Amino acid sequence: MTVKAASSGPAGSRTDAWKRRGDMTLRIIAAVPLGYAVASLWAMALARLLPGDRAEATVAATLVAFALCAGNAMWAFAARSGWRAFWTLVVAGAVAGGLTWLSIMGSERL
């Protein structure tokens, strides 16, 4: 007696394929444009918050942003799902944007 493995059929494999494509699309969006935007927001926040001369703080913040951009791309593909990667980067960008906004309202480094 042989037992056949249960298969999801052609319709199941199509939905699985679309789920994988959607997940990969979200990861790519999170890695490239969103990762760059988050790194830019952190560069702005750090340039305003780091001590020292304006030029030195800007250079240091830009160097940190290069590492953050690469880290964001790695996180986008290391997260459990595309949605988790997307929303984690959105929250990180919101925090950096909030810090930048608060420093502008507080008149630091204008």
Image: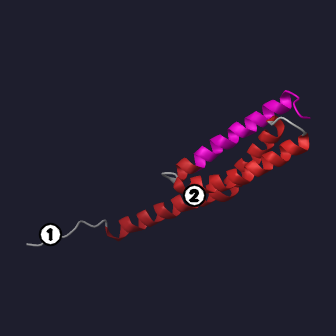
107 left or right of 5 in image = right
Image location (x, y in percent) of residue 45: 78, 39
Q: Which residues are magenta?
A: 86-110
Residues 64 and 79: in front is: 64
Residues 30 and 75: in front is: 75
> Dominant secondary structure of the magenta stretch?
helix
Question: Against 7, is 70 above or below?
Answer: above
Measuring 74% from the left and 39% from the top, which residue is drawn there? 97
Measuring 55% from the left and 57% from the top, which residue is drawn there? 77
Q: Secondary structure at mark 2?
A: helix
67 left or right of 19 in image = right
**Residue 27's disc number:** 2
Residue flagged by tag 2: what amino acid is it?
Arg
Mark positioned earlier in the residue sequence (1 or 2): 1
Q: Secondary structure at mark 1?
A: loop
Residue 99 location, quadrant: top right
Classed neighbour count for the residue bearing mark 1: other residues with Cα under 10 Å, few (<14), some (14–19), many (≥20): few
Measuring 52% from the left and 58% from the top, which residue is drawn there? 23
Q: CA distance from mark 1 to mark 2?
A: 39 Å
Residue flagged by tag 1: what amino acid is it?
Val
**Residue 86's disc number:** none
The residue that mark 1 highlights is 3
> In the rendered image, which quarter contains the N terminus?
bottom left
What colour scheme governs how the chains and residues are painted in the rendered image of this protein?
A: secondary structure
Image location (x, y in percent) of residue 84: 53, 48
> In the rendered image, which quarter contains the C terminus?
top right
Residues 14 and 94: in front is: 94
99 left or right of 82 in image = right
Image location (x, y in percent) of residue 7: 28, 67
Residue 14 counted in the magenta span: no
